[in-house]
Amino acid sequence: MKPRNQRSDSITAALQAAQNVAEGPREPLPHTPIPEGARPFWDAIMRNKPRDRWNDVDLAHAANLARCQFDIERLQQELDAEGDLVGDLFVGKLNPKHKLLETLHKRVAYLSRLIHVHTEATVGRVQDAGNALQLERRVESAGNVHRLIARRA
């Protein structure tokens, strides 16, 4: 039987969180290296799940996810430079990189759900986010945010 997860407000959970921070973010596995350009994606993925919750299979999937996200950005830059159509101006065809981008986006969505780093797993239910957004919009429309409340640059 799988042990229960610790309550997030327990001393044990606080100690685990401190240990996770002290050990730093996880590194890619030796057999799943990622290119340097994918490193920012890897770092972002690693921050979306507690360090002690990653297992080797999840780390391998995370490496694939980081590479896919990097490839999406690279392909998008190439498409921006090449344009949507290739070939003759009047008989141009859709750039085949569009199909690659679509496939990569689907793969990113699948891998994010597989390793539980998608929005619902990290932020919460859509309904809860909607409620938070409604509250934020009410405060915004009231225009009464105190000057001492910190603002991000």
Image (spheres, helix red, strand yellow):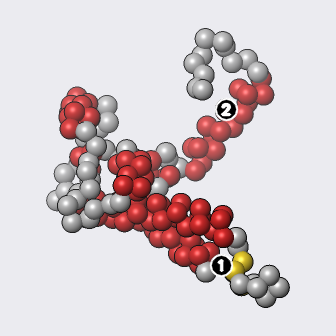
Which quadrant holds the C terminus?
top right
- In this rendering, which labeled residue sits more in front, label 2 or label 1? 1
Q: Which residue is mark 1?
A: 95
Query: Label 1 is placed on what type of residue?
Result: Asn
Choose between 120 and 152: the one closer to the eye. Answer: 152
Snapshot quadrant of residue 135: top right
Residue sitting at x 67%, y 32%: 136
Would you call the spot at circle 1 few (<14 residues within 10 Å), some (14-19), or many (20 or more)? some
Name which residue lies at 42% across and 49% down. Answer: 40
- Residue at image coords 63%, 68%: 79
Of 113 and 103, the residue lying toward us: 103
Residue 22 locus on image (x, y percent): 22, 33
Q: Is residue 92 above or below residue 79?
A: below
Circle 2 — which element? helix
Whether residues under marks 2 and 1 lie with C-beta atoms below 8 angstroms apart, the answer is no
- Give, as a three-letter code, the residue at label 2: Glu
First-in-chain label (2 vs 1): 1
Residue 115 visible in the displayed image: no
Q: Is residue 32 visible?
A: yes
Q: Residue furthest front?
A: 88
Estimate how packed mark 2 is, as few (under 14), some (14 to 19) or many (20 or more) residues with alpha carbons within 10 Å.
few
Using residue 6 as the reference point, say whether residue 102 is left or right of it: right
Give the quadrant of the N terminus: bottom left
Where 96 falls versus 59 (above or below)?
below
Report helix, strand or loop for mark 1: loop
* Circle on res. 51: none
Q: How many marks?
A: 2
- Position of residue 24 measured from the top left corner of the image (x, y, whole percent): 25, 39
Residue assigned mark 2: 136
